[in-house]
Image (tube, rainbow, N blue to C red):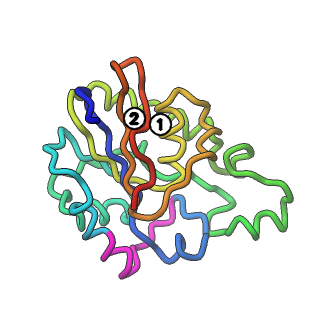
Amino acid sequence: MSSAYPEIYLVRHGQTEWSLSGRHTGRTDIPLTPAGEEAARKVADRLPVIDFAAVWSSPSQRAKNTCGLAGFGDVRIVKDDLAEWNYGAYEGVTTKEILAQRPGWQLFRDGCPNGETAADVGARADRIIAELREVNGPILIFSSSHFLRVFGARWLGLPPEDGTRFILDTTSISVLGYEHDLTEPVIRRWNQN
């Protein structure tokens, strides 16, 4: 069932060496792998034919390149608030390595030393949500996993920490929208490959 209200399409960037190895990639600007580039080229074929009112991207090259390879680079607007979680001291480190030093650590609950907390990321997500609700039309967004997970939680009015309950694969497509009216935000589809 399609909605009479605008839908928001979320695309996680393509594979990188660090997403493949599980290293936290916040602000380190690394490129897509050849497999990530190939998957990004196929994103447009997986989207419905829509005249998007806006196409927004994280400032990272992995998000911008996924956007460009998907065919939307010429209309892309970079939004700093779409940047991935700032992992601070945990940048480039795997969860397994963090847990060896800090047993019981959970990103969405504990945040990162010298980086962001879930509340910090949630505040950025809230600013993006406020902006997109001013646009009367469908929007396509390219960003990274942990930011988009918090974004999904905030879209529903959940605490940013509840982003832990959503998983996103590389080049997955998710769709946010509304049920009956603009006061009822919903997730229409999540993590489609």
Q: Amino acid at mark 2?
A: Ile
Give the image quarter of residue 94: bottom right
Dots 2, 1 in contact, CB < 8 A: yes
- Give the class, few, some or many, for how many residues have Cα within 10 Å of label 1's Cα (few <14, many ≥20): many
Query: Residue 47 at what x, y percent from top left?
Result: 24, 54
Q: Which residue is mark 2?
A: 128
Query: Which residue is found at the position 55% from the left and 54% from the top?
Result: 167
2 with respect to 160 (left or right): left
Q: Which residues are magenta?
A: 27-39
SS class, disc 1: helix
SS class, disc 2: helix
In the displayed orientation, state which residue is furthest to the front.
1
Is residue 70 something that shows in the picture? yes
Query: Which residue is found at the position 40% from the left and 56% from the top?
Result: 192
Relative to 147, residue 70 above or below: below
Check if residue 49 falls in the magenta segment.
no
Q: Which residue is mark 1?
A: 125
Query: Residue 86 at what x, y percent from top left?
Result: 57, 52
User: Which quarter of the image is occupied by the N terminus?
Assistant: top left
Check if residue 34 falls in the magenta segment.
yes
